[in-house]
Amino acid sequence: MKKITLHTLQTLKQQQQPFAVLTAYDATFAALIEKAGIDVILVGDSLGNVIQGQESTVPVTMDDICYHLQCVKRGSQKTLVIADMPYMSYATEEQTYHNAALLMQSGANMVKLEGGDWLKQTIKGLSERGIPVCAHLGLTPQSVDALGGFKVQGRTDAAAEKLINDAKALEQAGASLLVMECVPAALAKKVTQQLSIPTIGIGAGADCDAQVLVLHDMLGLNVDFKPKFVKNFLQETQGDVLEALSLYAEQVKQRKFPTAEHSFD
Ligand code: KIV
Ligand code: NA
């Protein structure tokens, strides 16, 4: 069983072969996700929403992420695991290094943090210390109150230009991956073409190098939550979970998901 590494993902980008990412929070789903051929698991702070029933990711703590990360690690062997750095866990340099180290020691292969070019020094420091970083731009849920709600980002010319410049700055600072959440498909495509690191989209169109969804969303488990970018894969497989996960992997790899119907312009 060959371990998936950053090098694997970098090669996939060069080959223009999209890869699939999915969130997981426990060992059972981590094992199914690995079986389904999904290359990367994100232990996302979306666990605040889908596991804890919170209204945002703001209440999620380091202890929460570490607990679910350890659960996920027991269920997966070869999948690359990214762990979210939760709200305010990277506010100062000292906190950043301390918390990133805890995540790596709990089994993460990479940490993810939300924000633009103000994170340059943070990302540089982490990557210099051998901690791979996934950046996250666009709709950054930890700042939902500052953003004035959950909405599509980068829609004005100025905001689009800012996002492109942020993406370049974070790559330059040492980020190894970039998540773009809820941004127009054309903008995500532009960023993907201009970066050499793989981009991972959620509500960012089909032209990113990879796609990510929240597990509970793509299984349609919350019947009251149906954003445009989510597809219910469990419905397509008549309730077979492993098949639903495999279908997601397959459709991402064949660029059959997302379609324009799941994207913003
Ligand atoms: O926490 C999460 O699930 C995420 C993804 C939506 C990218 O950050
Ligand atoms: Na997150």
Image (tube, rainbow, N blue to C red):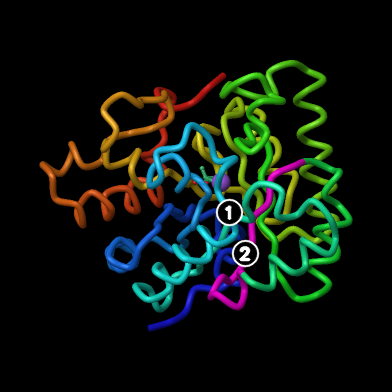
- Residue 43: x, y in percent? 49, 57
Residue at the far bottom: name it. Answer: 1
204 inside magenta stretch: no
Whichever of callouts 2 and 1 sits on the residue coming sooner in the sequence is 2
**Label at residue 61:** 1
Q: Which residue is mark 2?
A: 10
Mark 2 and mark 1: Cα distance apart in space: 31 Å
- Residue 154: x, y in percent? 70, 24
- Residue 165: x, y in percent? 84, 37
Extent of the magenta region: 103-115
Front disc: 2 or 1 = 1
Q: Considering the numbered disc 2 on the image, is that residue within a helix, a strand or a loop?
A: helix
- Residue at image position (61%, 60%) is 14
- Residue at image position (79%, 66%) is 126
Residue at the far left: name it. Answer: 238
Front-lying residue, 128 or 64? 64
Q: Is residue 72 above or below residue 195?
A: below
Query: Is residue 71 shown left or right of residue 64?
Result: left
Query: Is residue 168 shown left or right of residue 243?
Result: right
Q: State the image quarter where residue 134 is shown.
A: bottom right
Mark 2 neighbour density, 10 Å: few (under 14) some (14–19) many (20 or more): some
Q: Considering the numbered disc 1 on the image, is that residue within a helix, a strand or a loop?
A: loop
- Residue at image position (27%, 42%) is 219
Mark 1 neighbour density, 10 Å: few (under 14) some (14–19) many (20 or more): some
Q: Amino acid at mark 2?
A: Gln
Q: Is residue 6 above or below residue 143?
A: below
Residue at the far top: name it. Answer: 156
- Residue 106: x, y in percent? 55, 75
